[in-house]
Amino acid sequence: MSQPETSQPLGTTSARLVAVRLKSANKNIFRALLSLASVNLLVRIVGMVNQSAVAFTFGQGAVMDAYYAAQTLPFTVTQLLGGALEASVIPVFTKVSTRGMTDRVSRLFSTILNLLIIGLVGFTILMLILHQSLVILFAPGLPHDTLELAITLAPYTFPIVLMITLNSFMEYLLNARGQFGWPAYLGLLAPLITIVSILVWGKFYGVIVLCLSTLAGQILQLIAILIRAHMAKFVYVPVLDLRDPALLQIGKTMTPAIFAAFIGHISPLVDQIFTSSLVVGSLAALNTANKLYSVPVGVILSSTGRAALPVLSSQVAIRDMKAFKNTLRLYLWAVGSGTIVLTLGMIILGHPVIALLFQHGDSFKAADTTRTAITLIGYSIGLTPLAFGFILSRAFSALGKTHIFIYNGIVSVIANVIFDYLFVGPWQTFGIALSTSAVNFCTMAMLLIILPREVGSLNLLTPPREFLGILRKLGLDLIYVQWKAWREDILTLFPIPYSLYQRLSRVAIALAVFAAGIAGTINNAMFTLRIAFGSLVILALMRYPYILLLIWVAVDALIGSVIPFFNGNNFLSGLVAPTLLLMFAMPIKQAFKLMPTLPFLFAYVMWTLLGIGVSPDTTTQFLTIWTVYLAYVAVGVLVVNLVTTRKLLMGLIDAILVQSIFLSFFGIYGYFTKQYGLYDTDISSLYRIGSVYGAPPTLAFFLSMVIPLAFYRTFTLRGLQRALGVVVTLILLAALGLTFTRGAIISVSLSLVVMIFFLPSRRLKISLLGGILALGALAILVATFLDLPLFSRFLNSDILTLNGRTYLWKALLDNFDPGQWLGYGLEASDAVLTRLNVGHGGGVIGTAPHNVFIGSLFDFGIIGVSLMTLMFISIPWTLISRMRKATIEHRLILAVGLAAFINIFVQSLEVTVVWSQPVGIYVWMILALPFALYWSKPEQTPPQAYLEETQKLVVPRITHITKQEQPSHV
């Protein structure tokens, strides 16, 4: 977005000249709009004829389901690349072209073209190698025969990525030279060739003709557009100038453009995944309805967006926000009015139009027409909010607030998954289309809420003067005048202050909610009561996000525990919902920058979502677990952004320690009462505590993360309070010892030793080392005095197989196919081990992978385990690198974070509880503490008295109860 060279206000004469230019610009906009719309309409009409010919030849059954499944990925990729090229390459190329340097223009054009060819050829080859896995990924629910046909067609559809992307690139370059007609009309070649080919050869050679003719049409279009480019003086040079600074600028703008476009294209893939499990013909009906729905989108919305964006950008550049809002209101009224009429027309005329276009012969039957028409109605309902969102997004582009699109896209994907799940069961393809409309409403609402905060009130209910002029020309101005006079008379007789109007609006909303509550009570009283109470809780937690974090600390470990009250009462839903909503209200970019691990975690979580169609879990189970994974990211974002003072930091740490004390006491109580734990399988007299988890490894994992925090809190206390910190640390160590978990005790010992090297004071290092040695000696003494089989647990015969875990790992690796790069879906490793019943020594070893890396490899493929590996690597790298410039206390908590990570990493090699809900929230909460916003503030340094106290801190020689070990879940 261009900015004025000075911040001084415009002079009167300049302002008038600008106003004149902007006023005349509206006429040019409408002319350009009519020109673009006419070309787009012609292309869409030919496309509809093409679709009609396809339906006439191949019908709407399993064959077309296979074709659409095979072409989904290449067409999605071309749309992603096309949008990114338009947003990044063309502005830079235009800027270079305006400087008149012909040689540099030719070199830049040739370099970009060569890079595109090399990259696209390589990418196409990769897709061809993995074509089977890719087809299964994007249409996992297809019947076996249909899926096999789709896999057969994929090699003929995937090369289209190269042709369409090159065509788009050349078209954008010609547009940059002011040539719009030729590139647009050349787009008719591919559908015309396809129509002729399938009508002549389709009945003889089948659907493969459709694939080959589409590819041939794109090749001919590329040849024609290259000829036109040569006529437009584009000169190709066989060069690859990677040192051109324009390439760096292109790379910087292309990355966020691709990411935002990728998020926007996830929803159609989610729709296809849900649709692929419906009856035969559903996928074809959805695609046909979507093509019809895309006609007004392409003709009206695309043309309007291209015409309006330059004017909005100009008004922002001269800081004339009044004109900006007037122009925006004009386009919203114009597009809104037009799409309302179109919506009614599509709903009323959808069925006869579909029958006229497609219902020919026996291939496309009346049932197919009905299904497609109903699906089109579902799409049509959301046409007007889609139009509003389309124009509002151009307003954000003009303002330079493009980061909003990423947040908006993430919310849209999540909402789409939820709505698809809710609507697909009762309404089939209509439910999928209605889900898209519901997402459009959510997007429109989000943008309408955010934009006024940027530019002020939009006054959308006030008609633009251009509309009043149209009414005047149509002779309808008297109706508007009479309505306005009537409204003023009513307001004069019954004046309503603005404050009262706000209250009445709230009362109306309350009455609507009350009516919905009555309807819900009649249907399911208890469920409605839960929703009503839960909504109040959610709103309260969103109002006080720090309280939300404290409630997570207090409740999360208890959800799904042995305490019945916390099971089945929607505690998890009540916490996850406000957490996810708050995440998108927080500065995510700031959190990702302060804690670089979060982007890797987010990428890993989004990658796991792609396995929704192949996971052995039901859709409900999958989405429940996946939203918890996403909540891990959200909790990290909240901790980083909300912990801004030392008081908030210590409050969160104290809350975690209080919860750990409760879990420890509960576990110790279970040791004496022999409850909530288990007897060791090898040493029958050895009872291991599990506390509320009922599983010793899970309790040990939790305590091992918290113990470094207990040391940190003890270091920061003084006097009697420090003695209390020592007592808390002893209790946690005692509870850890009673779990008798080898891995946890080893990792805690190792983490404390490593922590010594990074402490900010030599006195602290010596004191902590002495305390560890004393604790070790005391642990051995206590184990000997109480006759605890400590050495038997550490040195028994199963130590070489890690308690049988190696057999589980071998079973998973033997059943893993490296070509299944997506993996087998969430919890597939658990399902496979349950089916195999891997045993050794007369019993089943376990049904969990007992290693997060092997489990992730099997469930989410090579890419999934690679993302998780990068995530694990980034944590210690960032912690250690930031110690150099950290203050004393910050370095101390960085060392604590490193110790907690060591415990997490070591135990993740033998258990997978790091991803389980009762523990995972605490993992990311603790790891986020060293990266909180508090540490980035210059005023965060504690008082000098505290620093002096810290420098001479001596850790008391606390006695450490037995260091036991961690067995497996069995």
Image: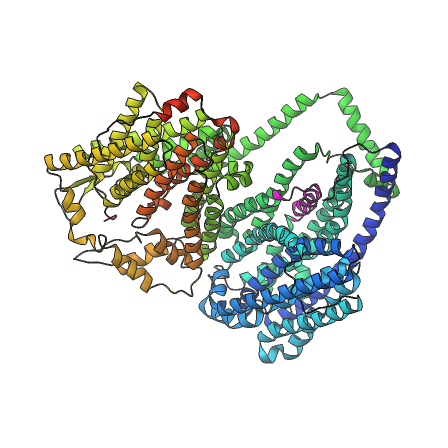
Q: Is residue 473 shown above or below 356?
A: above
For the N terminus, the image quarter is top right
Position of 101 with respect to 473 (left or right) is left
In the rendered image, which quarter is residue 749 located in?
top left
Q: Give the prevailing secondary structure in the magenta stretch.
A: helix
Residue nearest the observer in this picture, 253 or 75? 253
Is residue 396 in the magenta section?
Answer: yes
Position of 351 with respect to 814 (left or right) is right
* Residue, far bottom: 204
At 42% from the left and 30% from the top, the residue drawn is 888
Q: Please count the marks in the image.
A: 0
Q: How is the image coloured?
A: rainbow
Residue nearest the observer in this picture, 475 or 463? 463
Residue nearest the observer in this picture, 629 or 485? 629
Residue 28 location, x and y as percent? Answer: 84, 49
Answer whether residue 192 is visible to the viewer in this image.
no
At 58% from the left and 47% from the top, the residue drawn is 409
Highlighted magenta segment, given as a residue range: 383-403
Residue 587 location, x and y as percent? Answer: 55, 37
